[in-house]
Amino acid sequence: MRTRDHLKAWARRVKRDCVTLWFAGRHPQTPWYAKALGVFVVAYALSPIDLIPDFIPVLGYVDDVLLLPGLIWLTIRLLPPEVLAECRAQADAWMQAKGAKPRSRAGAVLIVALWLAAGAAAWYWLGPRP
C-alpha cells in the first residue's frame, strides 16, 4: 500500500471516529467525562469555523492534522468497549446512508464565542488604561 493510500485510510478512520463520538455523546452508557470531552471535540470537528483559521501559514493546519485527531483518539480511549463498538456501527451506517459528516451550528457558535472571549480578554489586558 502506498503512503497516499495509508493517509486516505487514516483520514476515513478519523472522520468515522468523529461521527462515532457524535453518537457516543447521546449513548446512555457513555461516562460523563467522555461525553464532556466528546461534545467539545464533536462541536469543534463539525464546526465550519476553525479555532486557528487555515489561512494562517503552518499553524492553520496544525489543529486539523494534530490537535483534532489527538483529541478524537483520547476521547475514543475513554469510551467503554461495548459503547464504542455500538457507536462505530451507527457511524458506519450513517456515513454509508448520508455520505457526509453532520454539521454542527452549535460548534460554530462555540468557536465564535471562544474567539470573541479571546479578543475581549486581549482588549481588557492590553487595552488603554485610564
Image (cartoon, rainbow, N blue to C red):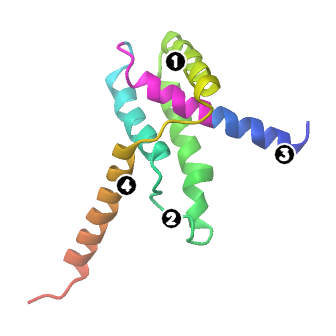
Q: Does the magenta portion include 24?
A: yes
Classify mark 4: helix, strand or loop.
helix
Q: Residue at x 51, y 34 (%)?
A: 74
Can you give x and y, in whole percent of width and height, for residue 84 in the image?
A: 53, 17
Q: CA distance from mark 1 to mark 3?
A: 28 Å
Circle nearer the N terminus (3, 2): 3
Of mark 1 and mark 3, the one earlier in the sequence is 3
Is 105 located above or below residue 121 in the figure?
Answer: above
Q: Quadrant of residue 111?
A: bottom left
The kind of residue tagged 4 is Ile
The quarter of the picture where the C terminus appears is bottom left
Q: Which residues are magenta?
A: 15-28
**Mark 3 vs 2: CB contact within 8 A:** no
Query: Is disc 2 surrounded by few (<14), some (14 to 19) or many (20+) residues within 10 Å?
Result: few
Query: Residue 27 placed where, x, y %?
Result: 39, 17
Query: Cα distance, mark 3 to mark 2?
Result: 25 Å
SS class of the residue under badge 2? loop
**Three-letter amino acid code at disc 1?**
Cys
**Residue 111 placement, left or right of 55:** left
Which numbered tag is attached to residue 87?
Answer: 1
**Residue 12: image x %, image y %?**
68, 35
What residue is pinned by disc 2? 53
CA distance separating discs 3 and 4: 31 Å
Name the residue beneath numbered marker 3.
4
Q: Secondary structure at mark 3?
A: helix
Answer with left or right where residue 85 lies relative to residue 37.
right
What separation in Å lies between label 1 and label 2 (alpha carbons)? 30 Å
| Outermost residue toward the front in this view | 98
Counting residues from the N terminus, which is met first, the one under dot 2 or under dot 4?
2
> In the current view of this chain or complex, which residue is farthest to the left?
130
The disc label shown at residue 111, or none = 4
Mark 1, residues whose alpha carbon is within 10 Å: few (<14), some, or many (≥20)?
many
